[in-house]
């Protein structure tokens, strides 16, 4: 089963709650078959945007177009969209099969056919044979699979998911991230996924839209957003970002940079001396203020005489010497010129 997926176009969507601007003229185009994630802190407007797509939130201005059809005024049940929520929203008093059949029965599909299609959807989410079980007799991961099967069963052209994995423990969550992505790749359904977990967004998405205060701050492929964040907010939200004025960096690489700008260096792009310092490297020198072993890496914190703080993440297999380092000792670290990113338009003074 490969549904024909549809593109989505969101134009100038605005939504206010009283005086509060929850969506600030959001414009966004999503390609047919794309997996797009809305990522942002709590209250940034992710759910509001998703609910406006689903038809549960009515925007004051702007338009939502799905597959060329303006659906802005259509009720949710006329939009042919599958939705998966964080809390599953399953019917606890119905069996697994009855839950999955439900959207089909609502659409008037005859019972035998609904049962067959529900079983096929359960196979897709690896729950074949679970049809007769009560929802109460399932684990969290299995319930989330039922919710997925129920959203997929009527072959929607668009799938919306609002933090579907946040109730699961870390290992299951990471496993399900790959499962959902694989399901998406098999079915090709245009998917919009909401999360506040940057690692989840990086793992799953074709593109990520980073939201803050009702606006999209940046949109792009995971590697672009991670490596080339536009501003301090996106840099900090996407991972461990060291941000310092270019004037405070040393080495031949730093001398090639414009002055009085803000530079970002990801923690894992630093290396410690020794390693013959070559041209073009950007260096920082500081005192070790803390260190921690975290299994796959060491985290070291340096403070420079200028008062800048840098966090270094060194892969444990290349940083055996870290266990000997003394707090207070002076360290020199460097990053390759190409790994230092200047934040757009942000001046340090
Ligand atoms: N029905 C409502 N009435 C009033 N304010 C609302 C309503 N729904 C959302 N808001 C406000 O709009 C803002 C955006 O909320 P939204 O739920 O879209 O954020 P979010 O990014 O999904 O956050 P979270 O990750 O916490 O779910 C928040 O400040 C929220 O308090």
Image (spheres, rainbow, N blue to C red):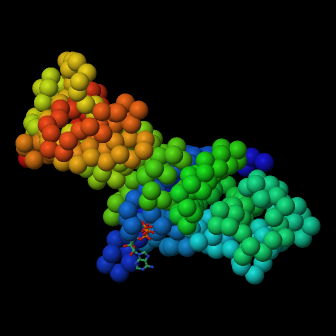
Who's the residue at 14% across and 26% down the image? Answer: 251
Percent x, y of residue 65? 55, 57
Q: Nearer the viewer, residue 186 or 142?
A: 142
Which quadrant of the figure has residue 246?
Answer: top left
Who's the residue at 15% across and 39% down the image? Answer: 329
Q: How many marks overall?
A: 0
Query: From the viewer's perspective, is residue 193 above or below residue 78?
Result: above
Percent x, y of residue 75? 62, 72
Q: Quadrant of ligand 1?
A: bottom left
Which quadrant of the figure has residue 134?
Answer: bottom right
Q: Nearer the viewer, residue 111 or 73?
A: 111
Query: From the viewer's perspective, is residue 25 above or below residue 266?
Result: below
Q: Can residue 7 be seen here?
A: no
Who's the residue at 33% across and 75% down the image? Answer: 20
Who's the residue at 42% across and 44% down the image? Answer: 295
Query: From the viewer's perspective, is residue 6 above or below residue 251?
Result: below
Q: Can residue 112 be seen here?
A: yes
Q: Nearer the viewer, residue 345 or 222?
A: 222
């Amino acid at each position: 089963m490969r549904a024909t997926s549809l593109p989505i176009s969101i134009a100038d969507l605005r939504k206010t709650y009283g005086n509060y601007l929850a969506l600030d003229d959001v414009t966004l185009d999503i390609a047919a078959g794309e997996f797009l994630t809305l990522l942002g802190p709590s209250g940034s407007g992710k759910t509001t945007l998703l609910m406006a797509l689903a038809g549960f939130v009515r925007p004051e201005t702007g338009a939502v177009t799905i597959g060329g059809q303006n659906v802005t005024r259509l009720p949710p049940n006329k939009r042919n969209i599958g939705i998966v929520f964080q809390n599953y929203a399953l019917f606890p008093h119905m069996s697994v099969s009855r839950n999955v059949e439900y959207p089909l029965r609502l659409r008037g599909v005859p019972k035998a056919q609904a049962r067959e299609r529900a079983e096929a959807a359960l196979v897709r989410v690896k729950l074949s044979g679970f049809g007769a079980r009560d929802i109460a007799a399932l684990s969290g991961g299995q319930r989330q699979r039922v919710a997925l099967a129920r959203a997929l069963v009527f072959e929607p052209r668009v799938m919306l998911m609002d933090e579907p994995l946040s109730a699961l423990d870390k290992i299951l969550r990471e496993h399900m991230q790959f499962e959902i992505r694989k399901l998406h790749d098999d079915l090709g359904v245009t998917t919009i996924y909401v999360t506040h977990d940057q690692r989840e967004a990086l793992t799953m998405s074709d593109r990520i839209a980073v939201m803050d205060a009702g606006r999209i701050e940046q949109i792009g492929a995971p590697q672009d957003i991670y490596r080339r964040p536009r501003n301090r907010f996106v840099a900090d939200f996407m991972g461990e970002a060291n941000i310092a004025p270019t004037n405070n960096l040393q080495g031949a690489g730093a001398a090639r940079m414009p002055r009085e700008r803000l530079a970002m260096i990801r923690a894992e792009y630093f290396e410690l001396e020794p390693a013959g310092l070559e041209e073009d490297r950007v260096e920082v020198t500081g005192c070790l203020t803390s260190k921690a072993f975290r299994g796959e890496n060491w985290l070291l914190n340096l403070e420079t005489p200028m008062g800048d703080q840098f966090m270094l993440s060194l892969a444990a297999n290349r940083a055996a010497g870290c266990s000997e380092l003394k707090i207070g000792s002076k360290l020199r670290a460097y990053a390759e010129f190409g790994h230092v990113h200047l934040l757009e338009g942000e001046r340090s003074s």
